[in-house]
Amino acid sequence: MLKRFIALLFTVVLAGGVAHAQEIPTGFTAQGSAVVQAVFAGIKINLGAEVGFENRGQQLRIDVSRLSVPGSDPTMNALIQQFLPQGSFTAVLDRASHTIVLWSTERRKYYTISSTTATTASPATIMTSGSILQGLEFAKTLKDMALMDMQVNLSGHSTINGHPATVVHYSLREQKRGGALTATSGDFAFADDQQGLPVRVTSVARGRNFTGSFRLDFRTLSAVPPDASAFTPPDGFTKASDPSEIFGNLSSAIPH
């Protein structure tokens, strides 16, 4: 339910941005940090990382480094460490060819995951058809709800991470029939000087047996697409035969 709500929220925000600016960024680069905090049945989990995003057309590059679990419950910390990737890694998602290319700078190796289904649909077509289908899927779930309250508000304008930004606050409360009440709220800060790209995203979720929060901050942000070479493994890298050569401990979670 929350995933569909966020998808609809992004559709509303994108539509508003297009109407206002009359243009959509053809790409962007961003570097910053992400922090996830959660408490499940009294067990505290923290996960932090340095992250980078680069987008050009239908290609998205994600760089992750310095993964850590500061301040987590010691037992949970040891368990999480068994599944965390060892070192930094890069993932490139190509929506046109349905491929994911992974590589490790430390190991100088890359690994490719591919799908037999590819699409050549334009971003505008994808956004329009996806929005309609998401809306229908969202409406179908209402029959199972005992309570649902969602709001999207313009909460103001401020300077965030060095950018003049427009801040949108969202909140969602939901309860399925016979289920527990869950509440999620947060903010999207959109950089006014970078064609409305998000410069900060925050979220807090509360349920019967858990609380959690997420924060993504970009220290640098630019609505300029990177060079096409950013989406291919560097020269001299060799092809890995297994994702464990890229991720180490995380290999069991990667299909191959």
Image (tube, rainbow, N blue to C red):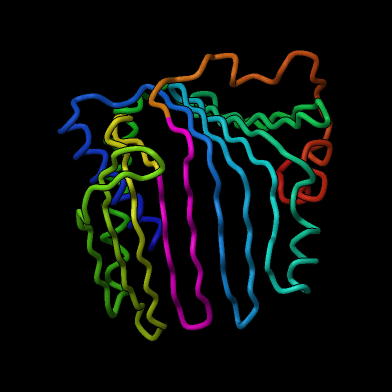
* Span of residues in magenta: 200-221
Give the percent coordinates (x, y) of residue 230: 59, 19
Residue situated in front as seen by the camera: 178 or 38: 38
**Residue at the image point whose x is 31% and y is 46% from the top:** 10
Name of the residue lying farthest toward the left: 19
Q: Find residue 18 and report its image quarter.
A: top left
**Residue at the image point whose x is 36% and y is 45% from the top:** 160
Numbered marks: total:
0
Q: Residue 116 vs residue 254: left or right?
A: left
Instruction: Look at the picture and state if 199 lies above or below 59.
Output: below
Name of the residue lying farthest toward the bottom: 178
Give the percent coordinates (x, y) of residue 209: 53, 82
Give the percent coordinates (x, y) of residue 228: 54, 14
Q: Find residue 47 and report its image quarter.
A: bottom right
Instruction: Look at the picture and state if 191 lies above or below 147.
Output: above
Q: Residue 188 vs residue 73: left or right?
A: left
**Residue at the image point whose x is 29% and y is 42% from the top:** 165
**Residue at the image point whose x is 46% and y is 22% from the top:** 56
Q: Residue 28 vs residue 77: left or right?
A: left
Residue situated in front as seen by the camera: 169 or 218: 218
Q: Quadrant of the N terminus?
A: bottom left
Residue situated in front as seen by the camera: 169 or 32: 32
